[in-house]
Amino acid sequence: MGYINQVQGYRESLLETRSVIKKDNYAVITPDGLVNNVVPGFKDCDVTILGSPRLGARFVDYLVTVKNQGGNKTGFAGDGIQSFVYVVYGKINAFADGKRYELTEGGYLYVPPHLQLTFENNNNGEDSRLFLYKKRYQPLKGYTPEVVTGNVNDIEQEAYEGMKEVLIQDLLPKEIGYDMNIHILSFKPGASHGYIETHVQEHGAYVLSGRGMYNLDNEWMPVDKGDYIFMGAYVPQATYAIGLDEPFSYIYSKDANRDIDL
């Protein structure tokens, strides 16, 4: 298996971790201790499964390090399952519906549930790291989502709920045909949510930069770049950005535009 941070063997200090797992509630998972999972279809990739139904999520999040000419050329998701890939660093070629999309750092591609995603590394022999997502689509009569691509560097940051120190970017259209969205939320040092949120939506979040203190079910805990956070439905949640000059920023998924099935 092997650890994603490539640290193996005995430690000089005692074994310890900041990771906290509360199944069906919330989790903070740090890079130290993540193992590589063997997942069919992924060639020359280090794959670690983050959020999943086994944790309590209705989606699956992955962190994928693509090496050499590796990738997934057999097809990811489809058959009723939508997918999304975001380039944390590096460069890949992604494919959907017979088209090629060249994605660099900050680039992303959403693939609707009737199509499959494939991709390959295109970073001159250097690694590329991807945040990968899949979720079964909840159909809505008369609506079909389409392929969406872009780069966060081309998306304007907007004030989150009127707070100019908290900025949000929407990566997918705010249209009812999509049953989820992907956002990037960025907090300047010292900024915070305006209140502790409690809502039916669940999130899977990967920290891109900075540090924060996160309230999850009224437990405050530190989170850092490279951490993964799962927030289940109705879990009270909010954060303060800490640090000196780097914004606390994370990419996260959010289910949307659907009623609750009974």
Image (cartoon, rainbow, N blue to C red):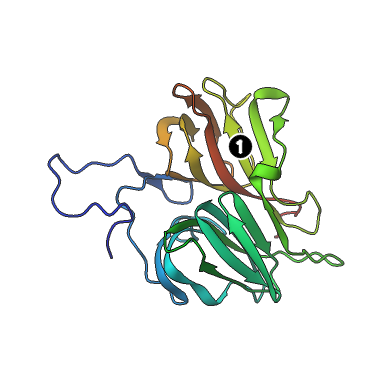
Q: Give the quadrant of the C terminus.
A: bottom right
Q: Residue at x 55, y 69 (%)?
A: 119
Q: Does residue 211 lie above or below 258 as drawn? A: above
The number of numbered discs placed on residues in the rendered structure image is 1
- Can residue 200 be seen in the rendering of this structure? no
- The residue closer to the viewer here, 73 or 215, is 73
Q: Secondary structure under badge 1?
A: strand
Q: Residues within 10 Å of mark 1 (few under 14, many from 20)?
A: many
- Residue located farthest toward the front when viewing the structure as drawn: 124
Residue 51 image position (x, y, % from top left): 48, 55
- Residue located farthest toward the right when viewing the structure as drawn: 142
Q: Residue at x 15, y 46 (%)?
A: 11
Quarter-of-image position of residue 37: bottom left
Quarter-of-image position of residue 40: bottom left
Q: Residue at x 54, y 36 (%)?
A: 249
Apparent side of residue 107 relative to residue 30 in the rendered image (left or right): right
What amino acid is labelled 1 in the image? Leu
- Can residue 205 be seen in the rendering of this structure? yes
- The residue closer to the viewer here, 255 or 112, is 112
Residue 108 image position (x, y, % from top left): 63, 55
Apparent side of residue 94 relative to residue 113 in the rendered image (left or right): left
Q: Give the quadrant of the N terminus.
A: bottom left
- The residue closer to the viewer here, 212 or 27, is 212
**Pointer 1: what residue?**
185
- The residue closer to the viewer here, 190 or 21, is 190
Residue 16 image position (x, y, % from top left): 23, 41
Q: Does residue 164 lie above or below 140 as drawn? A: above
Q: Residue at x 15, y 54 (%)?
A: 9
